[in-house]
Image: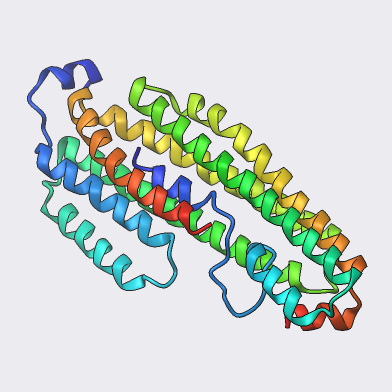
Amino acid sequence: MKREERYKQPPSLERRRVLRLAAASVLVVGGCANLNRTSDLDASLQDLDTLLAQSAPEGAQDDVNAIARRIESRARDLATEHREFVNGFDRMLAKHSATEAQLDQLIEIHQRRRTWLRNDLLYLQEELRASLSPQDWAQVAKVLNETGTGVTVYTLSEV
Amino acid sequence: MPVLVTLAAASTLFTQDTSGVSFLDPKAMRERCIDVIDDGNVRKRALDLTEALEKLLGQYSKAVVAALDAYRAETIAVASSATDLIELLTALDTQRTETLQGIIRIRQSLRELLTVKQWDRLFL
């Protein structure tokens, strides 16, 4: 189905469910940022799984759910990559015998992988936007912006 | 928007490993320098380096906030493509690399300043 045709039809995905799914995705990703809150992460994952299970296995819901899962998976990869790099880099910095060349190499490998994962995440986001009507996307963006702003401020306040 | 929080989390530079002194926590490092290095020229230079580290990480944090603000503005105002957003975040990638290299340079200066014994007292 062409995107223009899809937009002319009533939303195939119930709006409230889209918003909840989007909010749950934010929580899942937010949970990845903090190692000490695995229980929050588990709860968010459970919430997301419940929402996914409630979705009918056909049409746009399938598309959106599949993309949401891929976003979640890629977001986890990026969060893990970041966490492992920061901890590894930090440990190597404190090690007197570590050389500049070793540190440079660690950075180079990480930056390459990080950029690839980050870019892929942005392409998936674009795919998600294309799967929703502009109205649904606007609603999702509004909710995520509010939630995301709060989490971003919290995350950066830790620096 | 769905990936905003991930971008924020994956941009920060602080460690959650609190078992020792960290180059990513200049304030704690400063305190530790005062504790373990005898008062004198070496300590003063070590404190200068922690100050430089703090400044470097502070500049990077500001760049992260600015980049994420720009990202939010871009995704709200217009239907930006992934390519547009990648372009927008590329400047932050460059600053991140420069910051990490700056940390290595400061570490090298500290390494040349301290004896192995002083280094071990600071980090072990």
Please state the total of marks drawn on the protein image.
Answer: 0
Q: Is residue B2 visible?
A: yes
Residue displayed at 47% across by 45% down: B7
Q: Is residue A86 found left or right of B30 in the rendered image?
A: left
Q: Position of residue B59 (x, y in %)?
A: 64, 44
Asked where in the image residue A100 lies, by quadrant, the reply is: bottom right
Q: Quadrant of the C terminus of chain A?
A: bottom right
Q: Position of residue B43 (x, y in %)?
A: 84, 71
Residue displayed at 85% across by 58% down: A101
Residue displayed at 16% across by 36% down: A59
Q: Quadrant of the N terminus of chain A?
A: top left
Q: Is residue A99 visible?
A: no
A152, above or below B28, in the image:
above
Residue displayed at 69% across by 70% down: B29
Q: Is residue A7 found left or right of A153 in the rendered image?
A: left
Most foreground residue, A54 or B23: B23
A19, above or below A43, in the image:
above
Asked where in the image residue A125 lies, by quadrant, the reply is: top left
Q: Position of residue A32 (x, y in %)?
A: 41, 61
Q: Position of residue A54 (x, y in %)?
A: 11, 53
